[in-house]
Amino acid sequence: MTISTRAERIVILTGAGLSAESGLGTFRDKDGLWTRYDLNEVATPEGFARNPVLVHEFYNARRANMLAASPNAAHHALADLQQFAPARVTLVTQNIDDLLERAGAREVIHMHGELTRALCAACGHRWDAPEAMQPADPCPACGAKATRPDIVWFGEFPYHMERIEAALANADLFVAIGTSGNVYPAAGFVQEAAFAGARTLELNLEASANAGLFDETRLGPASRIVPDWVAEMRS
Ligand code: NAD
């Protein structure tokens, strides 16, 4: 007997593994972008204060990679599930790319921000990011030259936590896809959902750090195991 196909309120958490087969590196890739940069220098507020040019260079490269990439079968399957399943499907992602949206998914909750958005560090105004950003770009609202990517860095609070907590408290099925279970608070969502009574399923290439917390784990590449699971949910 596999995880219930009769779920009514599904919360899906996705991580870098969802976009790996679209060519966007995970943290763990041997040759990935992340390995060529020190995370403390490019993904912290302190790093941005020290060297905003380097930080913009890093995210400009990631934005270029994202724009050159296409959604894979796993992104499309999740968008289909959201559209066709009788269940309410809440998509929460740690990914800062827009591949779920480009596959047709709606109301994706980006808890770690989005490469497509810019944020003024001076006044908090947000706007659509250009393809390449620079520290000297003025904020369209206040004019300050304090433009940063609208990304949640290490040491900052993830976005939309109230919405996510509410969805987890009401979920009857929680599914984690392509996430290593190392980065909190997302790594704790499986326990929150389980405490609230949800069944829990992990879909991953390799078992995550907290695989033992899930009711069921299925291993394989996202482009195969996610469409297989969605087909089951629709049957
Ligand atoms: P992670 O790099 O820590 O873990 C990646 C996970 O994906 C691993 O569990 C791995 O087994 C799995 N994986 C790799 N290839 C896969 C495939 N083809 N199919 C299925 N699973 C596969 O990434 P994470 O857990 O998302 O870490 C969270 C942090 O990584 C977040 O802060 C996020 O913003 C950041 N991140 C985002 C992107 C992106 O936006 N595309 C890319 C890299 C890192």
Image (cartoon, rainbow, N blue to C red):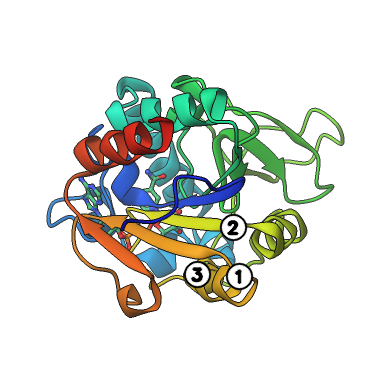
Seen in the image, is 228 located left or right of residue 166? left
Q: Which residue is mark 1?
A: 197
Q: Which residue is mark 3?
A: 190
Q: Residue furthest left?
A: 30
Q: Kindly state the secondary structure of the residue where label 1 is placed.
A: loop
The location of residue 21, given as percent across then percent down, is: 21, 36
Dot 2 amino acid type: Asp
Q: Which residue is mark 2?
A: 172
Q: Residue at x 82, y 34 (%)?
A: 143
Seen in the image, is 36 located left or right of residue 96? left
Which residue is more in the foreground, 195 or 40? 195
Q: Residue at x 53, y 30 (%)?
A: 85
The answer to whether residue 131 is visible is no
The location of residue 70, given as percent across then percent down, is: 32, 22
Task: Tell me if label 1 and label 2 are in contact, CB under 8 Å.
Answer: yes
Q: Is mark 1 within 8 Å of ligand 1?
A: no
Q: Residue at x 56, y 40 (%)?
A: 114
Name the quarter showing ligand 1.
bottom left
Dot 1 amino acid type: Gly
Which residue is more in the foreground, 51 or 80? 80
Q: Earlier in the sequence, mark 1 or mark 2?
A: 2
Q: Kindly state the secondary structure of the residue where label 3 is placed.
A: helix
Q: Residue at x 74, y 54 (%)?
A: 163
